[in-house]
Image: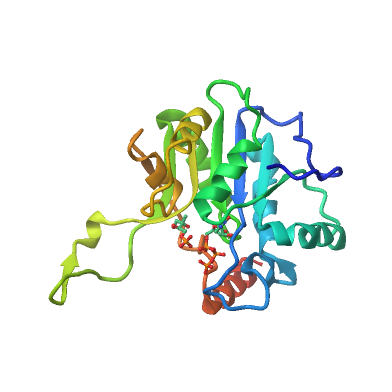
């Protein structure tokens, strides 16, 4: 359910009307084991989620509305962050759910029900703060052409599948590691998220798979998901190197 946020909740009318984004940041960051959800940990002195939001606020992307999904008990904290960092980027604040799937569904409900035919929505993890502009743009363009387009990268390590007795190698040339943004025709994603949730839904592509083929777009190894403590160190180093 959208949460009233007077200063920041209105979409920017000047931007192109057919691109939307949902930044999911409704998780609690158990694997990080920090004193607060990892989307609020600091990178170069600013919360991870703020970095991510800035990437989507880039005017050249022409995104009409950005929805940020947060845990209910972090909404007030985010409002404090907005004040502290004098954030003026317009976004709609939404309360998340118990799973990523539920949080994306809540984000979708905050987008205009009467969005134009052909409207696109990018779903992005709030904890992937280093996503390059080119990757975001590429998923929007590929989704406009194919209906569904997700960023992915080839594995760098060898991969094995666990079996009853031991394990067996997989051909990594045929594997891809899924990143976000995962970008879709808005009507298609809405249809997919009306289906019941399954335990196999680890990302948005897996939710859409039964309805529509998903195009893979070249992701970027810098677009890491901050999950465990070493990811934060790596993100700091990458940001420092980028100047
Ligand atoms: N109920 C949830 C769970 C996850 N997410 C978001 O989905 C993204 C990917 O999830 P993950 O890395 O697993 O985040 P957490 O669930 O916070 O981490 P953990 O699994 O370690 O608890 C994150 O941006 C996270 O905030 C969400 O919006 N709502
Ligand atoms: C959506 C995702 O980031 C694609 O790699 C990933 O599936 C999220 O998984 P998590 O277990 O919720 O971190």
Quadrant the C terminus occupies: bottom right
Residue 72 image point, x, y percent: 70, 56
Residue 27 image point, x, y percent: 59, 61
Q: Quadrant of residue 216?
A: top left
- Left or right of 41? Residue 161 is left
Looking at the picture, does residue 133 appear above or below residue 211?
below
The quadrant where ligand 1 appears is bottom right
- Left or right of 138? Residue 73 is right
Picture colour scheme: rainbow
- Left or right of 213? Residue 203 is right
Question: From this viewpoint, is residue 134 visible?
Answer: no
- At horizontal 61% and vertical 50% (from top left) the residue drawn is 23
- At horizontal 51% and vertical 33% (from top left) the residue drawn is 190
Looking at the picture, does residue 221 appear above or below residue 133?
below
Looking at the picture, does residue 144 appear above or below residue 67?
above
Tell which of 241 and 183 is nearer to you: 183
Q: Quadrant of residue 233?
A: bottom right
- At horizontal 55% and vertical 68% (from top left) the residue drawn is 226
Question: From this viewpoint, is residue 186 visible?
Answer: yes
Tell which of 57 and 22 is nearer to you: 22
Tell which of 223 and 242 is nearer to you: 223
Residue 68 image point, x, y percent: 67, 49
- At horizontal 58% and vertical 74% (from top left) the residue drawn is 232
Q: Quadrant of residue 122?
A: top right
Looking at the picture, does residue 137 appear above or below residue 38?
above
């Amino acid at each position: 359910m959208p949460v009233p946020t007077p200063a920041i909740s209105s979409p920017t009318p000047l931007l192109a009307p057919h691109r939307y984004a949902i930044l999911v940041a409704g998780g609690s960051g158990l694997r990080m084991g920090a004193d607060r959800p990892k989307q609020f940990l600091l990178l170069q002195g600013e919360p991870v989620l703020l970095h991510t939001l800035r990437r989507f606020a880039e005017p050249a992307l022409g995104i009409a509305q950005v929805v940020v999904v947060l845990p209910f008990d972090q909404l007030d904290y985010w409002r404090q962050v907005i004040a502290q960092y004098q954030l003026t980027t317009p976004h709609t604040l939404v309360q998340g759910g118990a799973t990523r799937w539920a949080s994306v569904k809540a984000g979708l409900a905050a987008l205009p029900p009467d969005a134009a035919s052909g409207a696109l929505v990018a779903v992005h993890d709030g904890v992937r703060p280093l996503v390059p502009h080119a990757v975001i743009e590429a998923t929007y363009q590929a989704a406009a052409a194919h209906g569904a387009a997700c960023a992915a990268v080839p594995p760098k390590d060898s991969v094995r599948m666990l079996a009853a007795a031991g394990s067996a190698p997989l051909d990594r040339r045929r594997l891809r590691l899924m990143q976000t943004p995962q970008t879709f025709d808005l009507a298609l994603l809405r249809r997919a998220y009306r289906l019941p949730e399954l335990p196999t839904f680890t990302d948005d592509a897996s939710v859409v798979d039964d309805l529509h083929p998903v195009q893979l777009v070249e992701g970027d190894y810098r677009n890491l998901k901050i999950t465990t403590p070493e990811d934060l160190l790596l993100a700091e180093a990458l940001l420092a190197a980028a100047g």
